Image: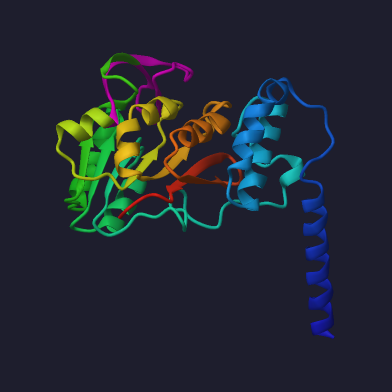
Amino acid sequence: MKRNIVFVAVCIVLIGFAVGCSNLNPSREKSEFEITYAAELSAARSLLQDRRSKYVFDNAVANISDRSNLRYGLHEQYLFMGSAGFPRYFHPLVTVSEGDTVIDGGSLRGDVSMKFSKKVGANGRVIVFEPDPAAVKANLKRFKKYEVKNIEVYPLALWNVNCTMIFYFEEGVYGRGTLFGYASPLTTMEVETITIDYFVKTRDIEKVNFIKLHIEGAEMQALKGAENILRMHKPNLAIAIYHEPRHLFEMILWLNSLELGYKFWMDEHDIGQRVNLYAMSALRVN
């Protein structure tokens, strides 16, 4: 009897999942965003490697269309999808390995930096860029407490040129600083920006294996400031793409235009509130 009940329950779940899959492209009026960028959205979606990535992409487009934001969770047509089955920034195919050099753009509390540190080991290196003063202080204190030797912290903002810019942040609250000024209330300060290309060249870094970017909307600029590194080293990439709607397609199309053999995946974390792009080059030589 119990087996029959379990069998029926499983069947109901599978039928519900199938119904959900059949409604992935609900008939709704297209938004201005979808109409304006129809060709770009279609081209970017076609480059995603699996069905899960396409579901995530469609959910993000639906959120933008209905709410002009990528961060408001799972759209009602995609509630069955759920969050990613792996920790954020650690896609099972886009990996960090022992001995790697990792560029970590935007460290917040240092949690992800610490995970990278363990992954790369004593022979690896984690290079953190974080312009937020409170975050820098917290990171340095934490890394010292745990005697982490393979993490370096630079109070610089990643960008596509080396210059001085205004950095907007909330006093005493780290992790919300931005070069774009959309946080409130705001405190401002001048920060030095740097390109990944310039940093790597001037520090004689032999190879960059992995780049992670979560820098509050500056991800596209930082990527363009790393073009030479992308061409030479073809690092694995994990990038937050939910701060600016156009990032949903711009990053994929720009990276693809470089013809470096990158393959793309997309996934959602924290119940759809944070969308990440993952990329790995088929031409990469370890």
The residue shown at (35%, 45%) is: 235
Does 231 appear above or below 182? below
Q: Residue 63 magenta-drawn?
A: no
Q: Is residue 135 left or right of residue 22?
A: left
Residue 263 shows in this picture: yes
Residue 40: percent from left, percent from top: 62, 28
Q: Is residue 159 left or right of residue 184?
A: left
Q: Where on the picture, by quarter, is residue 18? A: bottom right
- Quadrant in which the N terminus appears: bottom right
- Quadrant in which the C terminus appears: bottom left
Residue 82 shows in this picture: no
Residue 256: percent from left, percent from top: 49, 36
Q: Where on the picture, by quarter, is residue 171? A: top left
Label count reads 0
Q: Which residues are magenta?
A: 167-196
Furthest-bottom residue in this view: 1
Question: Magenta span: helix, strand or loop, mainly?
Answer: strand
Q: Where on the picture, by quarter, is residue 211? A: top left
Q: Residue 194 magenta-drawn?
A: yes
The residue shown at (72%, 48%) is: 79
Does 196 appear above or below 274? above
